[in-house]
Image (cartoon, helix red, strand yellow):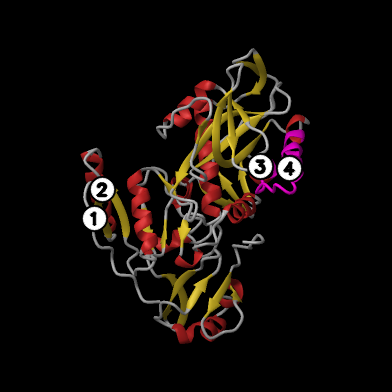
Amino acid sequence: MSELVDVTNPSIWIKGIEAPVKYHELVKDKASKKRYLNSHHRTRDGVICMCKETGIPLGVGLRQGTYYLYPLHHSDQERHAIGCPNYRNASDKESDERLLEYKNGRVVLKGRIAKENNNSERATLAGDEVLEVVRKVSIKKKQQVIRNILEALWVQAELNVWRPWFDGKRDYKTVRNRLVMASKNLYVDGLNVGEHLLIPYAYNFNAPEVSIQQYEKFQKRLYSNEVIGGFVVGFVKKIHIDKTGRSLLFLQHCPRPMVVSKKNIDKFFGKFSIKTGSGIALKKYDLVVSAFVIKSRCGHRLYAASLSGFRVNNYRMMIPISTTSDEKLLSHLYENERRFRKPMFVESKIGSHVPFVVLEDVEDRTHLEVFDSTMDMELLKDIQAHYSDKKQSVWWWNAEGPIPPLPNADRR
């Protein structure tokens, strides 16, 4: 993912052809379709759309003498990049019910972030520290948007997808580079996320000034009055309470901490059952945080007005999780060298059920679900009814017992 890809005209890999073919060239007329697709009619691995780096296989059909491409499974449409011609039809009414959409060459996330206005409010923090906070959107709504931005970056960077050959290649530097690349074409409330984003460089002890310069450049822009706020994404390192009572949040590789109100930091970390207090340190690369930061009068530090985030299963994979059972199942999939995708709320139809995992190495794209005795039984019945209505294969694991055998992987 070294450069932005034109997802509206993706490269199509075709078995037996040396160089990939552009989609528009392939489908431009009946003769072109026949030339490229006739030898792959009814095959399952001869044509692959490269709108995403992992590639999505396509089927080849024949109707009234004309070859055409089709998804091998109904859920495959959502695997493609937003804007790809093989993605769910952009004119579909369901597109209005999704948080991510493709408009004018941009990936647009629905939601609002504070806009500049003349009604500044003053927020007082511990230690009589006064901050100028420009708000037009409630903090609660803003927190959800901040979470959605983080999920959108993870999805666009394909960090919710796992293949056995990724093992040993998904380190912090790689994750950062993919997130930065994904941010360049992500917009929310008219703002380009990439232009307002700080993800710390991997800290180099031989050249610490590089990280400091990056931080100060971001901070300078924030204080220039060109923008109201910015976004910071990183892995939590530790929490510290200073002598004035301020909560300081340290991120991995970031040279300076962010100031966070005690109320916000207690609420955020409480969701993960993490105690907050001075010197509390987290396991390395355990919790990813996304923050909306604004300028403050504390000078050299950023103030996090909103926090959101999620845990990841481990440093090797960095797949988002919610519970220890999720972590256990992902480890099981890793040990069995399975290919899978972790769907995220932000890419799904609003209000629809989001499966825990989709196996991508089986023909029926089996959905994996986890439950236990603490789960609401009415909700469980609704999920079961959902799968029955969709006629979608599903695998269940009661987390209070052993993990049952997984569906056999296809050989390819």
- Closest to the observer, 139 or 238: 238
Q: How many marks?
A: 4
Whether tag 4 and tag 2 are in contact, CB under 8 A, the answer is: no
| Inter-mark Cα distance, 1 to 2 | 22 Å
In front: mark 2 or mark 3? 2
Which quadrant of the view contains residue 245? top right
Helix, strand or loop at disc 1?
Answer: helix
In space, the residues marked 2 and 3 are separated at their CA atoms by 38 Å
Q: Which image quadrant for residue 11?
A: bottom right
Mark 4 sits on what residue? 214
Q: Residue at x 44, y 77 (%)?
A: 45
| Quadrant of the rendering where the N terminus is positioned | bottom right
Q: Residue 253: x, y in percent?
A: 63, 43
Q: Earlier in the sequence, mark 2 or mark 3?
A: 3
What residue does disc 2 label? 399
Marking on residue 197: 3
Residue type, numbered disc 4: Gln
Mark 2 belongs to which amino acid? Ala
| x, y percent for residue 306 | 56, 30
Q: CA distance from mark 1 to mark 4?
A: 52 Å
Which residue has dot 1 on it? 388
Foreground tag (1 vs 4): 4
Mark positioned earlier in the residue sequence (3 or 4): 3
Q: Residue furthest front?
A: 206
Say which amino acid is labelled 1. Ser
Image coordinates of residue 312 in percent, x first then y, are 46, 47
- How far apart are the alpha carbons under marks 3 and 4? 11 Å
Start-end of magenta stretch: 195-220
The disc, 4 or 2, on the residue closer to the chain's N-terminal end is 4
Q: Marks 3 and 1, how far apart in space?
A: 42 Å
